[in-house]
Image: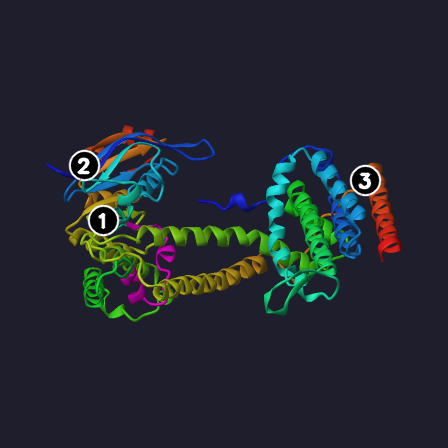
Amino acid sequence: MSCVVEIRDLSFTYPDGHKALDHITLDLAHGEKVALVGPNGAGKSTLLLHLNGILPRQTGEIRVSGLDVSGKNLGRVRALVGLVFQSPDDQLFSPTVFDDVAYGPIYQGLPAEEVRQRVQEALERVKMSEYSSRVSHHLSVGEKKRIAIATVLSMKPAVLVLDEPTAGLDPRARRTLIELLRELPITMIVASHDLPMVRELLPRTVVMDQGRIVADGPTATILSDPDLLARHGLEQ
Amino acid sequence: MHANFLDPYQEGTSPVHRLDARIKLILVIAFILTSALTPAGAWPIFTLLLSLVLSAELLSDLGIVFFMKRALLALPFVLAALPLLVTVDGVVLLALPLGLSITQQGLERFISISLRSWISVQAAVLLASTTTFPEILHAMRALGLPRLMVAIIGLMWRYLFVMVDEVLRMLRARTARSGESEFSGHRAGGTIFWRSQVAGGMAGSLFLRSLERSDRIYHAMLARGYDGEIRSLPQPGLRPVDWLVLFIVLLLLLSLLVLSRILWG
């Protein structure tokens, strides 16, 4: 089986000497939905930022759809990896929803007709079609979050990478988002503290602590191991 | 992702670091005034001023190279003085096309202004890298700058870092979506016009978010009893050595200024 994401022996140390990733090895198969859990500072976000080369690789290997994440491949890799940041305010920098969702396709140099079509599709996917001409600034957090996901769906990525998608959402917005992610037929890796969502949505769970992967397996098994969860600062 | 690298302060225990911030602030202002008031062409005085600031830099233990790098900040001011080369009347040194000519007086003025800005920036860099920002704020207050202005400068400093962090995160989100199409033949990057539109949109949303943030900050201040008046604890008295440094350096600067005015004025 070919893998969308292959990570081999990846280590990363921040300039201040803090070792954030310590020999990470991880594979994501096509269509897999994987949770990345662990305490704050475990290295989850650092790992996510490596997936499209925002943080330069120091040692080890990362491949996305068979492409080495470095140098001349970065442009392709950034279109293949849809990275959704925790704060939608950082993600939505354009005046209108349309401009934001169109950013990726326009940057890629796609023809105008295809850009419009992709924006339409992406907005339909997150059930926000009628928001196209709205001003991002005035949306609610839940709406912004869905638009943020649309901004990467319009690039037709091979893998969706989400950092804390349910943080700060009220129960209804959280529910809408979970249903929406469930329906997306795409490989995804989701960093989260929201274990109920993990249990419901993501069949495989990877536990990180202090820059290492300390457990990797079926979500049901991992979440029913109270000792493991307690050791790594997680609660059922 | 933090913009801590912007903070010019460098830890240290040198005599320059330990000198009271109020004294440092007064001396730096006096130094900049002296160099600004020294007439053009007073080369020996400029040399003495330069050696004064260089000695203080050596005393600070941060190394001359550090200051030379930061003093590159003075370059834009030098550019502003460039037209003086051709606009001052006097003895022609070099005739240029279009009826322009470089004069001896023009050259003298240009070099003097460049020197002035270079050594003044060095003095300011010395102050900023050996004094923490809160100390500088206290010093401003002690020297009688109105409380409101000190408060504005302080808040600006505090939230400058928050804003820069925000900008960095936004740029990172943009980079993350700046990809190439799988089909060859599409040139990635978009047109210059479109890119400037995106940059404009980013600046606009940063502005809106800053405006909202300032509202939230003000409410948080009101919630803690802010009534328009900033209060601070009284500052400790000056040590005798602080007074000594103050008088010696002020005297030195004053005599250099008087000398330069008499001999070149």
Whether residue B16 is visible to the viewer of this picture, yes or no, is yes
Taking the image as shown, residue B226 lies to the left or right of residue A87, namely: right
**Residue B193 sits in quarter:** bottom left
Query: Mark 1 — on which chain does it sit?
Result: A
- Asked if marks 2 and 3 fall on the same chain, the answer is no
Query: Mark 3 — on which chain does it sit?
Result: B
- Quadrant the N terminus of chain B occupies: top left
Identify the disc placed on residue A48.
Answer: none
Q: Position of residue A144 (x, y in %)?
A: 32, 60
Quote the CA–CA distance across marks 3 and 1: 63 Å
Q: Is residue A100 magenta?
A: yes
- Residue A141 position (above or below residue A41): below
Q: Nearer the viewer, mark 3 or mark 1?
A: 1
The residue segment tinted magenta is: A83-103
**Residue A176 sits in quarter:** bottom left
- Asked if marks 3 and 1 fall on the same chain, the answer is no
- The residue beneath circle 1 is A80
Q: Are marks 2 and 1 in contact (CB under 8 Å)?
A: no
- SS at mark 3 in the image: helix
Q: Which of the two residues, A208 or B71, is positioned nearer the viewer here?
A: B71
Q: Which of the two residues, A202 or B76, is positioned nearer the viewer here?
A: B76
Task: Please identify the residue farthest to the left as the structure is shown.
Answer: A1
Q: Residue at x 29, y 55 (%)?
A: A171
Q: Which of the two residues, A71 or A100, is positioned nearer the viewer here?
A: A71
Q: Nearer the viewer, mark 2 or mark 3?
A: 3
- The residue beneath circle 3 is B242
Task: Please identify the residue farthest to the right as the structure is shown.
Answer: B262
Taking the image as shown, residue B235 lies to the left or right of residue A89, namely: right
Q: Position of residue B250 (x, y in %)?
A: 84, 47
- The residue beneath circle 2 is A220
